[in-house]
Image: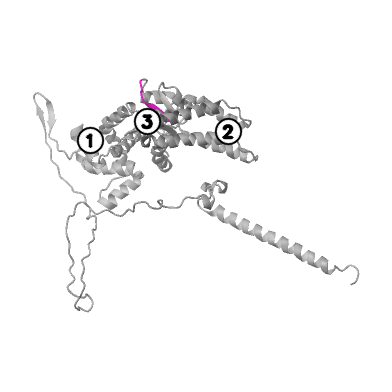
Amino acid sequence: MSEGKPTYDQLVALVQQQATEIARLKRRVIELEELLQAAHRQAAPFRRDERRKKPAAQKKRPGRPEGHEGTYRQRPEVIDEHIEVPLPCCPHCEGKLSDVQQRNQYIEELPPVRPLCFHVTTWTGVCPQCGEVQSTHPLQTSTASGAAGNHLGPRAQGLALLLAHRSGLTMRRTCQVLQDLCGLRLSPGGLAQLLQRAVDRLEPLRAKIEQQIRHSAAVHADETSWYVGEPLCCVKKGGWLWVFTTPQATLYRVEPGRGSDVVIDTLGNDFAGMLVSDCLASYNAIDCRKHKCIAHHLKVLKEHEESLAKQGIVSEDLRLWKILLKNVIATWKKREQVKPSTYARKVRQLQRGVQNLLGRSPPEAEAVAFRNRLARQRDHLLGCLSEPAAEPTNNRAERDLRPAVISRKLSCGNKTIAGKQAWETLRSVITTLPKQGTDLLETLTPHLRLATQ
């Protein structure tokens, strides 16, 4: 071979090198294509971080666990009409049939819905003793007449309240649904005025809910940001949406801040129950029994573990704290399944575990920070174990906040102070009544009548 030409081995090595580089570039092209596709997906900014997703082997099986009792559409309790469709012969060739068997179905159907329109004539007069008086009818919701004399009845108004605050529809969609399904014509402005008028009539129900909250054995509380178009104070716009909830009642409040004054004003200085909340300092000012949400502690613990994992460190103290906190939840769940003596012994064990872990001096800064966090909440770590009505986490309050957060995304809160007052009253009533097993429409209708004024 002449001088300067590559040898066979050199050519083979060059081909292998180029093949490796081509393979690397192909992989890079695939990665860039995937990134480009991901960037154009609608949920791209909100997608969960791939690092936080569980491996396929750890994912739960979708649906209910094996062996669960099956569910199906239940047979209606009331049958309005019995229909029989005979089969005397073959519907195709009219031949004789054999082995004829009966089959039953139960079909629930909606009849065509149209509003009932009533022409109500009332009279006014002057009484020498009482002054001006007038006759009224239970269908009336207002005494306005003339150009303002076309009204919605109390049941129709109750349905509008349900769509706006129970189903979470916007004003315009509420009006659209009423027109499409019921033939009721209502403008968004008219609906807003309707909701404002309903507030005064439902105020007694809201006041009753507040008293129920104050006299509850345990109250779960949480808060989130809320926008009000008019400033709640002279400094800034917006405010905070507070929720105070129990299994039987839920009270919403929109206030300018998230200070302790809201908690004390809602529950009262003589609140005898237990307050379940996160670790916000505003909940500490009230003098009552407290329990801090264990799920929030576990979330912070996980963040510390992930921080240490990046350094290749596994903290024994954080592992022990995780076991203890999960044992608190497990013990609370089994309260009704074990003997009182066994339960009391388990509680004492957990109390000793808390004392032991708080007395340790872990080497990791993250573990020290977590220990200090729980040391500040030492008196409120196991509160749920001493009060049956208190739950170990604050999930109950967060569940009641979730529909409100969806409403905030749709409407950005309230435009006026009157609107926020209407929202917190109506949402409190409409969220509470189903918890108490009452029919919403049947309960709201009497309160919306003129006779209740």
Q: Earlier in the sequence, mark 3 or mark 1?
A: 3
Which residue lies under the disc numbered 2? Answer: 317
Instruction: Decide: few, some or many residues near mark 2? Use Cα within 10 Å; few <14, some 14-19, many ≥20.
Output: many
Q: Secondary structure at mark 3?
A: helix
Q: At which x and y percent is residue 316?
A: 59, 35
Residue at coordinates 91% horizontally, 69% vertically from top-left?
Answer: 3
Q: Amino acid at mark 2?
A: Asp
Within the image, what quadrant is residue 305 found in? top right
In what quadrant of the picture does the C terminus appear?
A: top left
Residues in magenta? 270-276
Q: Using a 10 Å C-alpha cutoff, classify the residue at mark 3 as few (fewer than 14 neighbours), some (14 to 19) or many (20 or more).
A: few
Out of 453 and 245, give the one closest to the viewer. 245
Q: Residue furthest right?
A: 3
x and y percentages locating residue 105 in the rendered image: 23, 61
Seen at 18% across and 54% down, the residue is: 79
Of the residues shown, which amino acid type is indicated by label 3?
Pro
Kindly identify the residue that appears in the image at 55 percent across and 46 percent down.
52
- Residue carrying label 3: 340
Say which mark, if any, is on residue 415: none
Could you say whether the residue bearing mark 2 is in a helix, strand or loop? helix
Return the residue at label 1.
447
